[in-house]
């Protein structure tokens, strides 16, 4: 969790020196973005990979949308499987780009009302408002209990129709009306004083708003489990444990000397105060017990010797024995261990790391095992599939992408990291890791220095000062601050309450096991308010 920025800058500058677009996600604004109701929906769906722009980096928000294009959006938003093409209606070949999405919609009977008298479907036809509302209404009703669905179709939709009293309600196709009114009832699509305008075409930015509203409605109804890392300077957050389901104490580290010599260190003879058991630890343990949390002990290691340790079975045996001794200490009543071994760049280390975790898991008995993993863009020594099999929980450190052009955790890259992890790890085991931090670049005399991570307290003070231009940036979904002083001009990206809320939103979209918070002491009162709002506790 404690990335060394200069080391990352060196690595990433070598791997991704060309540009921020070296990552295969949308990391620059659309050239034709519009600052209206559609801006957040468009960039949110773009971050999720549900919508795409064009090769010239335009979105063309006011262009009409085809039936097949909207069906793709709806199926992806519903997270339905599209790997294979099943049955398709007449008028659609299985080779057509949209066939996987149309097949899903066809099998769910969403598009029955869109077939002509010959049972044929015209996928390229411009979609209308009533067709969109009908598709959304059917998708929503599919997620309801059978009795709710039947009651709506039998009688309740007529009550909604009479209450809405659209001036043009007679223009809505009869067989679509129950579903159109269900979409209206759920607040996804509504008319105005002139009516519903059922035959009017839907443009791209309106479609984005509809799909985003559909996702946001589902996500807003859910809560999430939070795991807090109580480490470094977290005492100020000790009273926030009631918002968590789990706590991980960052109180230990691996010490490896080589040649079979290794141990779990929980104290230090130097001035180093991180990754050791602090004075007053009993108060933190009591707070966790009062909040009825599970309590794991984090073991941290970030050293070039790690690859050697993973080949030193004698040292591993000694280390595990030392670890178990601490876990069994009744003074702490730990319920498990969290392994945070960082820096495995080479794929050749992957099998050794898995073997170590497998051996550790066997000896842990009833203790739980969580494992922190980095994005595998540049760390190849983490076999996500095998780690997912052995660990009870996998903590995805979806941050520290920082290079000369990127802040730590732009939402599109966070999403891409989650999608990659979900290809190997069940969602029920995956925690989305959020790192509370800021990234700052200083330019003086035309030269921009490598990024630094300023203290959160200093960032909060700076943001409260005059002459600081503060904006909510897309597509990063981070707060950006710009200012100047005697050192030069500054650009700063900050993980504040608004951006944290957006990452929680993403975790809930994918129905992940939860969210982890590194480290608790950095989170502000505003952050904790957001966490409390979404917490399952």
Image (spheres, rainbow, N blue to C red):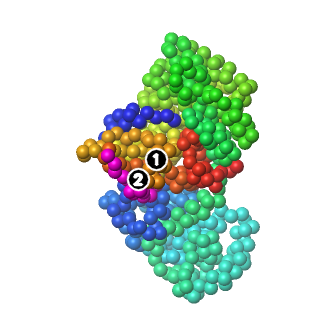
Q: Which residue bears the numbered disc 2?
A: 481
For this orientation, the residue located farthest to the top is 259
Residue nearest the observer in this picture, 16 or 296: 296
Marks 1 and 2 in Cβ contact (< 8 Å): yes
Q: Does the magenta segment cover residue 484?
A: yes
Q: Secondary structure at mark 1?
A: helix
Position of 62 with respect to 252 (left or right) is left
CA–CA distance between discs 1 and 2? 9 Å
Q: Which residue bears the numbered disc 1?
A: 459
Residue sitting at x 41%, y 67%: 35
Residue sitting at x 54%, y 13%: 261
Q: Which residues are magenta?
A: 466-486
Between disc 1 and disc 2, whose residue precedes? 1
Q: Can you give x and y, in whole percent of width and height, for residue 149 in the image?
A: 70, 69
What is the crowding at mark 2: few (fewer than 14 residues within 10 Å), some, or many (at least 20)?
Answer: many
Residue sitting at x 66%, y 30%: 280
Q: Is residue 310 above or below residue 471?
A: above
């Amino acid at each position: 969790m404690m990335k060394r920025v200069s080391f990352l800058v060196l690595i990433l500058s070598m791997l991704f020196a060309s540009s921020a677009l070296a990552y295969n996600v949308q990391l620059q604004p659309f050239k034709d973005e519009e600052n209206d109701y559609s801006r957040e929906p468009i960039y949110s769906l773009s971050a999720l990979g549900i919508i795409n722009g064009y090769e010239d980096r335009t979105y063309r928000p006011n262009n009409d949308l085809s039936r097949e294009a909207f069906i793709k959006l709806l199926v992806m938003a519903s997270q339905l499987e599209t790997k294979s093409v099943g049955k398709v209606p007449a008028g659609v070949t299985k080779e057509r780009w949209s066939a996987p999405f149309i097949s899903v919609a066809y099998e769910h009977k969403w598009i029955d009302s869109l077939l002509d008298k010959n049972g044929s479907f015209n996928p390229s036809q411009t979609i209308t408002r009533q067709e969109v509302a009908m598709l959304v209404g059917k998708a929503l009703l599919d997620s309801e209990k059978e009795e709710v669905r039947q009651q709506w179709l039998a009688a309740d939709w007529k009550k909604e129709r009479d209450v809405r009293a659209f001036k043009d309600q007679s223009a809505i196709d009869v067989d679509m009306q129950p579903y159109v009114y269900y979409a209206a009832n759920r607040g996804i699509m509504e008319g105005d004083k002139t009516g519903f305008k059922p035959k009017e075409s839907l443009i791209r930015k309106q479609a984005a708003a509809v799909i985003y509203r559909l996702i946001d409605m589902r996500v807003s109804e859910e809560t999430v489990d939070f795991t807090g890392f109580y480490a470094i300077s977290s005492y100020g957050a000790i009273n926030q444990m009631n918002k968590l389901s789990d706590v991980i104490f960052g109180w230990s580290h691996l010490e490896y000397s080589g040649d079979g010599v290794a141990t779990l260190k929980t104290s230090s003879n130097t001035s180093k105060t991180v990754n050791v058991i602090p004075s007053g630890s009993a108060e933190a343990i009591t707070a966790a017990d009062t909040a009825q949390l599970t309590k794991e002990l984090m073991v941290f290691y970030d050293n070039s010797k790690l690859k050697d340790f993973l080949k030193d079975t004698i040292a591993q045996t000694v280390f595990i024995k030392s670890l178990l001794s601490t876990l069994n200490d009744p003074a702490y009543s730990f319920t498990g261990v969290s392994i945070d071994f960082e820096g495995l760049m080479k794929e050749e280390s992957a099998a050794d790391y898995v073997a170590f975790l497998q051996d550790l898991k066997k000896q842990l008995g009833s203790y739980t095992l969580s494992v922190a993993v980095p994005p595998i863009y540049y760390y190849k020594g983490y076999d996500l599939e095998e780690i997912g099999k052995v660990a009870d929980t996998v903590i995805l450190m979806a941050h520290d992408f920082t290079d000369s052009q990127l802040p730590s955790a732009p939402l599109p890259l966070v999403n891409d990291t989650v999608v990659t992890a979900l290809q190997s790890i069940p969602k029920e085991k995956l925690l989305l890791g959020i790192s509370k931090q800021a990234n700052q670049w200083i330019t003086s005399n035309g030269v921009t220095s490598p990024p630094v991570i300023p203290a959160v307290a200093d960032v909060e003070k700076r943001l409260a000062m005059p002459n600081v231009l503060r904006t909510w940036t897309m597509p990063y979904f981070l707060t950006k601050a710009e200012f100047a002083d005697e050192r030069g001009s500054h650009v700063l990206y900050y993980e504040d309450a608004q951006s944290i809320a957006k990452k929680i939103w993403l975790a809930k979209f994918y129905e992940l096991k939860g969210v982890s918070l590194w480290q608790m002491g950095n989170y502000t009162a505003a952050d904790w308010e957001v966490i409390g709002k979404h917490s399952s506790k």
